[in-house]
Amino acid sequence: MAKSTSSTEQSPTWILGPALNFMEDYLRKSCKATDDELIYLKSILDLRIKKRQSAEIGRASYGFPSVVIDNFLYHGDLGHASNIGLLNQLGIQHIINICDCKLDQIIVDKFNVLWINLYDELQADIKKHFDLTNEFLYNCKQKNEKVLVHCQMGISRSSSIILAYLMKYHHDSLYKAYDYLLERRRIAAPNLSFFLQLIRYENELRETKEIDETKHQDDKQNPIEKLNSSI
């Protein structure tokens, strides 16, 4: 006779889909992800698929970082941050290095570098750095000075930092911030744990009224110029 299964032993209702069952199970068990959080995450992943298939996304130019906010915020990789000629050409004065590789001393000596030594792994707590990086970026913007945010490949860690900034100062949701970022850097893709942390950061911003979903005032605090090109 087959052994009966109690309600506590039954598999959860999968939300992310069969291809991501393992990741969903990890998020539920290790990160205590709720159904509501996973449903939101699914909508964000669907958005990424849609935007990457869209013909509206510009052509890539991999020799240069992506321009997220004109004359201010650039999004790139370790190669961009290590190229002193490129940094000078773009007029970069500040760098947020969010990866486990320290920049060469010649870069550290010439530019104002904030280094956050963090691995791109599901266990990493990236959210605890958002207040620091947001303050750093806000101060750069107030001084009208350019900043490059980068990680190893310019895909996961740096995207998370930029999305946290966009949520706090420009958009009223992670979904809208990611929609905006994908138009400018189509490879932007935080790992699923980082996305979950960004979802929770959005909730914290709502609780403190730093973003208010009832107003829907996108880009009112600090208007972003709409750009056509992206990476």
Image (cartoon, rainbow, N blue to C red):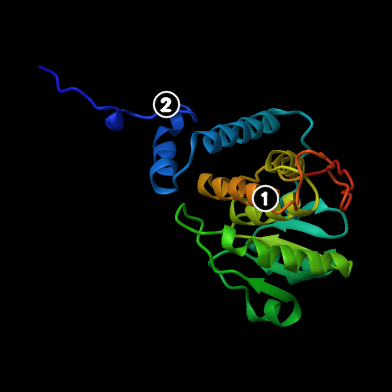
Hey, which quadrant is residue 174 in on the image? top right
Q: At numbered mark 2, what does the secondary structure look like: helix, strand or loop?
A: loop
Which amino acid, mark 2? Thr
In the image, 179 versus 75, the foreground residue is 179
Residue nearest the observer in this picture, 211 or 55: 211
Q: Residue at x 72, y 45 (%)?
A: 185
Query: Residue 218's quadrant in the figure?
Result: top right
- Tell me the amino acid under the disc marked 1: Glu
Residue farthest top in this picture: 1
Query: Residue 44: which disc?
Result: none
Q: CA distance from mark 2 to mark 1?
A: 29 Å
Q: Which residue is mark 2?
A: 13
- Give how far across and how far down residue 226 sits, in percent: 88, 43
Q: Which quarter of the rendering shows the N terminus?
A: top left
Q: Is residue 20 above or below residue 102?
A: above
- Mark closer to the chain start, 2 or 1: 2
Q: Mark 2 packing: few (<14 Cα in 10 Å), some, or many (20+)? A: few
Whole-percent x, y for residue 202 in the image: 66, 48
**Residue 129 x, y percent position in the rendering:** 61, 64
Q: Residue furthest left?
A: 1
Q: Nearer the viewer, residue 36 or 231?
A: 36
Residue situated in front as seen by the camera: 222 or 116: 222
Q: Is residue 196 visible?
A: yes
Provide the secondary structure element on which disc 1 rests: helix
Q: Residue 97 occupies which quadrant of the picture?
A: bottom right
Res 190 visible: no
Q: Verify CB contact (< 8 Å) between mark 2 and mark 1.
A: no
The residue lying at 74 percent from left, 63 percent from top is 148
For disc 1, the marked residue is 207
**Residue shown at the point (72%, 68%) measured from the top left:** 95
